[in-house]
Amino acid sequence: MLVFTLKRLGLALLVALAVSMLSFTLLHLSGDPASAIAGEGATDVDIAAIRAYYGFDRPLIVQYADWLFKALRGDFGESYYFQLPVAQLIGDRLSITMTLGVCGISFALLTAVPLGVAAAVRPNSLIDRVALFISVMGQAMPSFWFGLVLVVIFSIKFQLLPPSGTKSWENFIMPTVVLGYYAMPAIMRLTRAGMLDVLSADYVRTARAKGAGEMRVMFKHALRNAIIPVVSLSAVQMGFMLGGSIVVESIFALHGAGYLAWESIGRNDLPTVQALILIFSLFYIVFTFLSDLLNAWLDPRMRVG
């Protein structure tokens, strides 16, 4: 188990390093940051002065090494647009994105897992067809369109929920549904497939033959084993949801880290964009790493050593 953990940790660090290097290179090769900072009407002298001030005239590998060493100390530089430390900007807004992500994955699990179990218990029934319909719709429907439909129905037509802002818990209801619905299809399908495999296993038939109740067989024997791959998928979906919150936060005007990324991209605020890419990537890497450890702990074969 210790060897497995160290290997996974080393792989996670290498992935984080590769993501930071690739994103830094692509952002700086996409255009001249000095020209973006100087704005329209700037002279060549002004652009050259800005390039020298921010160190853009140095080799790219030197710029990356300088940024990486500072980032390891929590210093992501200063925002070109907001004129504030990037770490402070992200810290002020990250709680909104984390709240939205936790609510979204909770909604997805509380909805998709019971539907997947019910669909597996009664295959080809009405509940199975409803689950299939929800799964197909979740894959086919863009999140931005779904969010706009909810705003039109619940905010404009019936005026039941606020369309934007973060003043109360009601502001998070529609964004939670939109973000969680994105993860529901995959979780539902995996739960259904896992339950179908487990329900036909020998130990489930043995438990029923010994007189165990259907609820005990369903939750203690079947769901307990079928839910293991769902844990890994949920961690992956959580990482995707935090990164994909840019669209949802933009629609509902939730000024979280995702909305900050959208603002920074539009204003060529490279230090903020670079830091956000790294943080969103770390979310995905950390959640995947923790899910691997949990699955290894649940697998009896991995506990040896």
Image (cartoon, grey):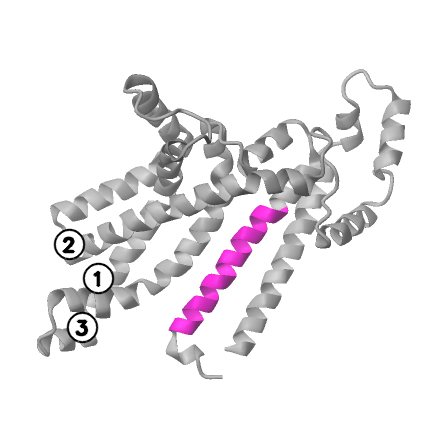
Q: Secondary structure at mark 3?
A: helix
| Residue position marked by numbered label 1 in the rendering | 196
Please say whether residue 32 is visible from this viewpoint: no
Mark closer to the observer (1, 3): 3
Part of the protein shown in magenta: 278-298
Contact flag, marks 1 and 3 (Cβ < 8 Å) = no
Residue nearest the observer in this picture, 174 or 228 = 174
On residue 64, which mark appears? none
Main SS, magenta region, reads: helix
Q: Secondary structure at mark 2?
A: loop
Residue nearest the observer in this picture, 77 or 147 = 77
Kind of residue at disc 1: Leu
Contact flag, marks 1 and 2 (Cβ < 8 Å) = yes
Q: Is 79 above or below relative to 200?
A: above
Q: Is 287 above or below relative to 149?
A: below
| Label 1 – label 3 distance at C-alpha | 11 Å
Please give the name of the residue rendered at 38% of the width and 78% of the height, measured from the top-left corner: 300
Tag 2 or tag 3, which sits nearer the N-term?
Answer: 2
| Residue position marked by numbered label 2 in the rendering | 123
Q: Is 104 above or below relative to 264?
A: below
Mark closer to the observer (3, 2): 3
With 134 as the anchor, is 140 left or right in this view? right
With 91 as the anchor, is 239 left or right in this view? left
Please say whether residue 240 is visible from this viewpoint: yes
Please give the name of the residue rendered at 88% of the width and 24% of the height, measured from the top-left corner: 46
| Residue position marked by numbered label 3 in the rendering | 204
Please give the name of the residue rendered at 34% of the width and 47% of the height, measured from the top-left corner: 108
Residue 153 point in image, percent of width and height: 30, 22
